[in-house]
Every structure is written in structure tokens, then in C-alpha cells.
Amino acid sequence: MWRFVINRFLLMIPTLLGVALIIFLLLRVIPGDVVEAKFMSGEGSGASAEVLAAERARLGLDKPVWEQFAIWMWGVVRLDFGISMWTGAPIGDEIALRFALSLQVALMATVIATLLALPLGVLAALKQDTWIDYAVRIFSIAGLAMPSFWLGILMILGFLIFFRWVPPMVYTPFWVDPWQNLVQLIWPALAVGYRYSAVATRMTRSSMLEVLREDYIRTARAKGLWLKLILVRHALKNAMLPVVTVIGLEFAFLLGGLVVTEQVFNLNGLGLLFVQAIARRDYTLTQALVLLVASAFIVVNFLMDIMYAWLDPRIRYR
Amino acid sequence: MTTTTDIAIVEAEAPERRRGWLDVVLDFCRRRPLGAIGAAIVVLMILVALTAPMIAPYDPLAIDFAAMLAPPGADHWLGTDAYGRDVLSRIIYGSQTALIVGFGAAFVGSTAGAVLGVGSAYFGGRVDLIVQRFMDIFISFPLIILALAMVAILGNTLPNLIIAMTAPMVPRCALVIRSSALSVREMPYVDAARAAGFSHARIILRHMLPNVMAPYLIMLTSFLGQAILLEASLSFLGLGVQEPTAAWGLMLRGAAVEFAETAPWMALFPGLAISLAVFAFNLFGDSLRDALDPKLRTG
């Protein structure tokens, strides 16, 4: 088991390194850099070439590309992501508050999705090919089909027309006013959570269907075990693994993938920061963000693999 | 109860004698009514896209300042937008964009994924390891950033958009196809082909690819809906199709949100079109997956 864990852990390193290298190179290939973005737009356009060169030198952009990469990587290893090229503030400060917001929305959406998906998925599997099953499937396929940002627009429109209520423009952190904070974030969480729950419902249903066909379920039934006990003890327990996997992967995806929904709800989360950072050619900030989102995904994947191997010894020896 | 009926269904799905395609279609409709409904909507959508110039009541690009933000009515069934363009006509023409991007991205993504997956399984060893690492990298890379970067580097054209959108599809498809191809590789006919001295390319393309058709088709159809959704999100962000082209995601952008209160039809109908299209593709894809391979789960 330990060998498997260590092997799997070591495999994360080349993946992260690859992500880092690709985003680093992509940013350098995109036309324009942070200095141009700063001086060429708005005031101060028409700065002389010397000023631009001095600014580039200050940010270390005049060094050879491989050296820039090495400097960045050396920082990353020591968990020092440097300062934002645009604002000059440490990356950690730039990201912290926004990350907290995105994390909270992702957590709330996960809770909503899980609470919806488990009962619906199990119900649909038990009543396969009845109207209940069809209703659940249509509900979940509709959830996959509706763009969450459109659902968000409809929600806001609904509040506006029926309650004359507009979501607040300013973000209230949880520790300042928990109630205000929850009222503000519940709607984006619902908009995203619906799609999320659809993914999880479908996985719960198909996983349950598969397990219900297994011999040990038939044995349990033949023994005359109480149906509820069979469901909880035997079926659900075995069907949960793939469900937990999709929930975990969707969660990791939500951390960085909320760009569009955030725009609709006027939230200042990681998604918006992403778009700003790349528009300003803020290399250090974009790199840190990509690395953050990718590591979330990679770590979740790693944990899932470990869990699988722990539960199913056959995987360890593959 | 459930278990016994399930077993009956599984048995009924065992391959039967060779049938004509009409029989297959009728059988599919009878056994999977939801899938048939999905397929019907897809066919309808393709017809609408093909006959757009004939059935659209207005030119989708025609600006009419006399009829700005007109509510749905006899002249404009679904109202007009902030430039007085007919929403219905733009939705009809938008189906062309959605289908081109959807089919384009899904086809390129799943085909590239299939070739990589089969190649990875066939060669095994170091090649497999390296390909898998690359797939890991692309799967964990945030999509929006990739799209932003691609558009900034390559320019904002439809083919570039399609390429950017295949980035998350290729690794997912490669993963699924690889696991099927691993068992195909052990088949005697692959050994025979190798013994006969055929080239690697020929064995992969002629002998292995056709035998992973089922998972390939399943991935392809599941990508169709996702691609349409993705295009809508990217266009909504201003990264996808550009004005004045008629595209559903684009129609939800800007004025549709600004004037949502006074002209809700601008936000309502394009969103409905997206949802209906993706809904139909998913419905069809699901049933196809159930029919082809009940064990494969694509989430």
C-alpha cells in the first residue's frame, strides 16, 4: 500500500511541473506584456522606450526566459510566489480573500448538490424505468443542459421582478455578518449547485443500478434481510465510491471554474481575478492562480486514487 | 423486484440476428423513448440550421432602430434586441454556429483522444507513461485560461475556438478509450497483424480503432452537448464567437443583462435554445450509451 501511495505521490510532481511550464510559456507567447499593458493604455501612454526598459528590468523581464522560469520555480518550491507584477502586492494577499469567496461558494454548492443527488439518484435506481426514474433523469439532464450563468440571470431577474431585490454589490465576509453573507452567496451556490447535483445524481443512479445487480445483493435479499438494511449496508456503501469521485472532481473544478457565474452575480472571486490577471498580462499572478487551481485538481485526484486503492486492494498491484 | 427486471433487460439486450437500419431505429425508439425524443429534437435542430435562410423571418444582422427592444408580438415573435435585430431570426441562425462548433469540437476532441488512447495502449511502457502524464497536465489545466491564451495567441476565429475547446475533451476521451484498447490489444487478431509485419500505424488505425467504436461514439455524443454549453459560456465572456455573428451565448451578453428587467425576452429565449439543444443531445447520448455499453460511465 505504501509503495502505491509513494508512487502515486511522485507522479504528481511531473504533472505540476508540466502545468507550470505550459502556463509559463503560454504567457510569454501571448503578445504584449505587463509593462505595455500598464503604460500603453490610459494615462502615461507614450512613455519612452527607456522607461519601458527600466520597468522591465525592475520586474526581471529582461532576463532570459529559462532564468525567469528557474527563479519562479525556486520561489514556488519555497512557497514564495512573489509579488503581483501589476499591483506590486504579494500574491498571497491578492488571492486570499478571493479564494475564500470561491471556496465558500464551492462548499455551499457541494452541500446542495449532495443533499439533492443522493436521495434522487437512489430513488431513480430503485424505481428504474418508472415515471419516477424518468422524472429524476429529466430533472438531472435539464440541470446539465442549462448554463449556470443563464440560471443565474433568470434568478436575478426573478428577484428583481417579483421582490424588487437586487443582490448586494459588496461582498460581506462570513465572519463580519454570517447571515448577510449566506443570503448573498446562496443564489450563486444554487445556480452552480443544480448542474453539480445533476452530475452527481446521474452517477449515483448508474452506480446504484450496477451494484443492485450484484450477487451479494441477491444473496442478502434471499436471506430475507430487511430492504432498508440491504440498501444502506450493502448497496449504498458500495455504490458511493464513484459518486464521491465525481463530487470531489466537480469541487476541484468549481474552485477555478466559476468565471462566468461570478460575473453574473457580481462576485469578486478567483474567476474574475483570473480574467483580470491575464488581461493585464500579470505573469506572476496568472501563474500562481493556474498553479493553485491545477494543484487543487491534482490533489483531489490523488486523494481519490488513494481512497480507491485503500478500499480495493486489487488496484494497488496493477 | 428491481433485480429480476434488470436481469431480464440485460438478457433482452444481447446481440440478435443482423437487422436493417430501420429496424434498429424503430427498436431504439420503442425501447428508449427519451432517447428518441432527444434524437428528434436534434434532427429538428439540424433541419432548422440547414434551412435557416428560408425560415428565418428577418436577416439576423439587420439593424432596425425603429424596433429597438420590441416585445414579442406579431411582427417579431420573440421580440428584438437592443439594435432592433429579430431575436427569433438570430436564434435560428445561431443554431448554425452551435452545431458547427458543437460537432467540430466534439469530433476533433474525441478523434484525437481516441488516436492517443489507442496509441498509448498499443505501445504501452514508456510511451503510455508519457502520454498519460500529458493527459494529466491538460485535464488539470483551467480551461478558461487555456481558452483565453489560445484566443490571444492565435486570434479569435471559429477554428481556433474549436481547437481551444477540445483541450479538456482530448484527455477525457483518451482515458476512456485507452482502457478499452488495452483489452483489444490482447486480441489474437492484433497479434496476427503484428506477426504479419504490418506497420504500427496500420495496426492502430485499421485493426484497433474500429474495435473501440462503441466508447468512441459514446464520448463523441457526450461531448456534443458539452461543446455547445462551453461555446455559450466562452461567447458570453466575449472569448468565443464575435459580434455581429448570431450565436446563442453571445445573445446573452451585454445588453441582454443590462436590459433584463425591461426586455427579459432577450435573456430568456437564447438561454432556452441553449438548454433545449444540450438537453436533446444529452438525452440522445445517454440512451445511446445505455444501448451500446451499459457498463461505461461518463458521468
Image (tube, coloured by chain):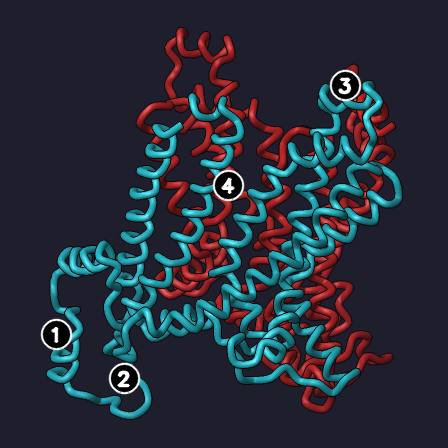
Q: Amino acid at mark 1?
A: Ala
What is the chain identity of the residue bearing mark 2? A
Q: Which mark is residue A219?
A: 3
Q: Quadrant of the C terminus of chain B?
A: top right
Give coordinates of residue B26: x percent, y percent.
85, 32
Residue visible at 27% across and 57% down in the picture: A25
Q: Rate crowding at label 2 as few (under 14), some (14 to 19) or many (20 or more) other CA atoms within 10 Å.
A: some
The numbered dot on residue B281 is none
- In this rendering, which labeled residue sits more in front, label 1 or label 3? 3
Are the numbered discs 4 and 1 placed on the same chain, yes or no? no
Q: How far apart are labels 3 and 4 at the CA level?
A: 36 Å
Q: Specify the subunit that label 3 lies on.
A: A
Q: Chain of mark 1?
A: A
Q: What is the three-letter code of the residue carrying label 3? A: Thr
**Residue identified by numbered label 2:** A40
The CA distance from mark 1 to mark 3 is: 74 Å
Relative to B213, residue B14 above or below: above
Q: Which residue is mark 1?
A: A57
Q: Are marks 2 and 4 in contact (CB under 8 Å)?
A: no
Q: Which residue is mark 4?
A: B172
Q: Nearer the viewer, mark 2 or mark 3?
A: 3
- Disc 3 is placed on an element classified as helix
Give the chain coloured red: B
- Letter of the chain that mark 4 sits on in the rendering: B
Residue at 26% across / 89% down in the picture?
A: A45
Label 2 in the same subunit as label 4: no
Q: CA distance from mark 2 to mark 1?
A: 17 Å
Q: Are marks 1 and 3 on the same chain?
A: yes
In-front residue for pair A3/A292: A3
